[in-house]
Amino acid sequence: MTPDFLEKYDCTLTVKTPVFVGSGKKLSKVEYIYEPSTKTLRVIDVRRLYEFMASKGREKALEDYFRRPDNYNGTIMFLLSNQIRRPDYDNFVAYTLEDCMLPQDSGGRGRSKPYDILEFMSDPYGNPYVPGSTIKGMLRTAIAASRIRRDAVLKSRIASKLERSTGRNRKYLAKEITEAEAAIFNNLEYEGQKQGDAVNSDMRLVRVSDSEPLSSRDLMVCKKFDERPDGTGNALPIFKICLKPGTKIKFTVTLEKSACESSLGKQFYSFDDIVRALRDFDSIYTSQFLNQFKNQVRPTDEIRCWLGSAGFHSKTILGAVYDDDEDLLYKTKEVFENTLNEKVFRQHGHELEGRKYQVSPHTRKKTDGARLDFGECALTYSKKAI
């Protein structure tokens, strides 16, 4: 393949509000040291801690702590009881986070109750990073929403498919979403291939690299806050390690021309197409969901993106398909009603949507304290010579 088939762009996402990209792992209370007086969180390398304790002949004490952590008032008290002081921490601390507000709720008998903390994605060397698949997923959602909004015929086809949705739990909308994605993206026309096959997806022509490695200095701990439409809400005992505002997420996007002819020609994507899609999606997401709440989002001239743990509507095309607020409300509520069991549906208050709350979901994901939305970034880019 010659370079004439490729265009490459250096891209930067500047974090505006905390961004969480989960690794699927969490730090249990035995895997960190929290010092309330200095708001310092020290994340432990458990293997190195075991080796250090073994060198002191205290490995059995550590094993007992792991089995019965409630016998101690946090890891710091366990270490102190074994004559392990702060100067020893360098032997087993993986990284340190500053200015962390991590409440220690009372657990009774004068004890505190440390919380588990959801970890950020990291590479094999322990450096935080954002996978290319996460960034490409964000672009894919934006492109899909933009195409739906700009093509009335496609929008009608997708709406018709979603209205035929049947089944419960994981089966609900599964077939319809697969068909909708094929209608949106399967624009390549490879000879001998069925149009519904994934090989015909034009997203094959968009390649996104993993981000450059980030640093633990780019991380902070955030507590989740669910905000209701009137501005009230609840702080939840859910803590996440997030990227700090101001962090630069650097990656590359490579656009490829198609090797086959189609109704769209060979040049499916220009970077201008992607920028337009991101702007379209931001308009849909902010107007139809975020701005249904008291604290509205200000417009911006930047290329605003919504990454990571931003919320339900940041990852779906429903807002593009249902541009009427009431239609969107009831379709979203229907999704929750068919994918959650009745107990969870009611615990989350979804039965109030359409009555007390005129938006679904009726909570907006924010950080406790500053009350910032999760996931807001601004994109800048430049073309790169190949």
Image: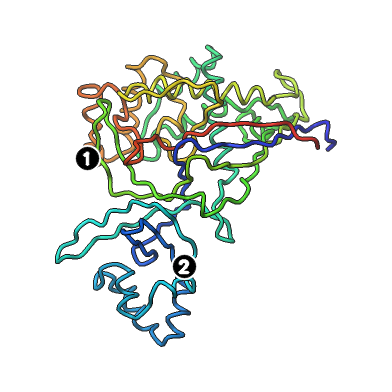
Give the foreground label among 1 and 2: 2
Please give left or right for residue 206 compared with residue 293 in the image: right
Q: Seen from this angle, which residue lies furthest top?
A: 152
Residue extending furthest bottom? 57
Type of the residue with mark 2: Val
- State which tag comes first along the sequence, 1 or 2: 2
Residue at image position (32%, 53%) is: 102
Q: Quadrant of the C terminus?
A: top right
Left or right placement of residue 206 versus residue 145 in this view: right
Label 1 crowd (10 A; few <14 / some 14-19 / many >=20): few
Kind of element beneath mark 1: helix
Is there CB contact under 8 Å for labels 1 and 2? no
**Residue in view at x 78 percent, y 30 percent:** 259
Amino acid carrying label 1: it is Gln
Of residues 139 and 327, the one nearer the viewer is 139
Q: Residue 225: name its quadrant.
A: top left
Q: How many marks?
A: 2
Residue 347's tag is: 1
Name the disc covering residue 249, or none: none
Disc 2: which residue? 93
Residue 278 percent coordinates (x, y): 55, 25
Counting from the top left corner in percent of width and height, residue 176 is at 46, 29
Element on which disc 2 rests = strand
- Image position, residue 333 (x, y; %): 31, 28
Quarter of the image for the N terminus: give it: top right
In the rendered view, tell whether residue 32 sits above or below residue 276. below
- The crowd level at tag 2 (other Cα within 10 Å; few <14, some 14-19, many 20+) is some
Along the viewing direction, whichever of 74 and 35 lies nearer the viewer: 35
- At horizontal 25% and vertical 68% (from top left) the residue drawn is 73
Q: Is residue 146 above or below residue 101?
A: above
Marks 1/2: CA distance? 39 Å
